[in-house]
Amino acid sequence: MSTTRIAYQGEPGANSHMVIDEHYPDAQPVPCASFEDVFAAVTAGDADLAMIPIDNSIAGRVADIHHFLPTSGLHIVAEHFLRIRFAVMGTPGTTLDSVKTVHSHVHALGQCRKIIREHGWTPLISGDTAGAAREIAEAHDPSRASISPPLAAQIYGLEVLAEDVEDEDHNTTRFVVLSREPRRAPAGDGPVVTTFVFNVRNLPAALYKALGGFATNGVNMTKLESYMVGGEFTATQFLCEVDGHPDEPGLARALEELAFFTTDVDVLGVYPASPFRSAS
């Protein structure tokens, strides 16, 4: 039986890599330089699945993903949540007092301002958090450290100088798993999330009317985001997520009403809701 290959953006030790290790321990992680490369790897068959971050509780939606998803031809088959934890790490012999510069992705630096300010370090931007750890390992300089996921310290042989250095303890990222083939969760077998995109017709109150069916049919909408299509201010696409399965009567009626006021409705995935939703 062949090993499942899961593509992700970043270098070994990135948060996406950690999610794969946690939920798919027997899979082979496939690092990619960009999100576009991740989508291409799955489309071309070089990877079986993709692990993609889509939202962060502090930073909001992950840029570009909402543009790639509708046109990728891939399908959401699962979701996972990861509590984001960062550590300060350096080469053996490095101490917090010897550090002068700290390296990481711009978002990680922004999420760990307190410890940076406390020690008076100079923050320097790297391409990603795991890549910053690799750069520190290669530099062998006790005046330099990285802010990276704990897994990166193991991979690159670094010493952890401080753990859980993020400013907020609710920092959580939601990931979705993408597949070439649709894999719909069955109805009536636990909580389900349905994700879809649509364009509204250019009519007065079209969005209001399009969404009315979800309210009248008792469907809980957990996400509604808009973004421009093709750079046109008048062409707006919406990404929507709701609780429920399209085969359930309430959601089926809501989607039927939605079709009256939209030009396109494309279901991107029907997948089991993560247990994190009910626990949070």
Image (tube, helix red, strand yellow):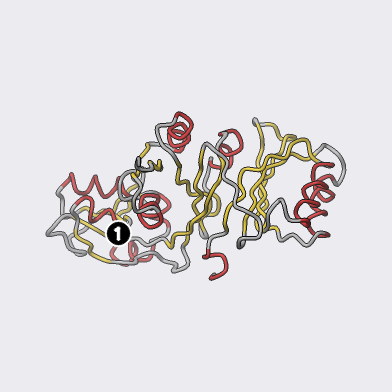
Image coordinates of residue 186 in percent, x first then y, are: 62, 53
Image coordinates of residue 176 in percent, x first then y, are: 51, 49
Horizontal side of residue 227 vs 86, given as left or right: right
Judging depth in this view, the residue of 202 and 198 nearest the camera is 198
Quarter holding the N terminus is top left
Residue at position x 71%, y 39% in the image? 236
Judging depth in this view, the residue of 27 and 118 nearest the camera is 27
Horizontal side of residue 244 vs 18, given as left or right: right
Image coordinates of residue 140 in percent, x first then y, are: 14, 49
Horizontal side of residue 44 vs 12, given as left or right: right
Find residue 95 and report its image quarter. Answer: bottom left
In this figure, which residue is indicated by the disc labeled 1? 150
Judging depth in this view, the residue of 214 and 123 nearest the camera is 214
Q: Residue furthest right?
A: 204
Image coordinates of residue 57 in percent, x first then y, are: 52, 60
Residue at position x 45%, y 46% in the image? 51
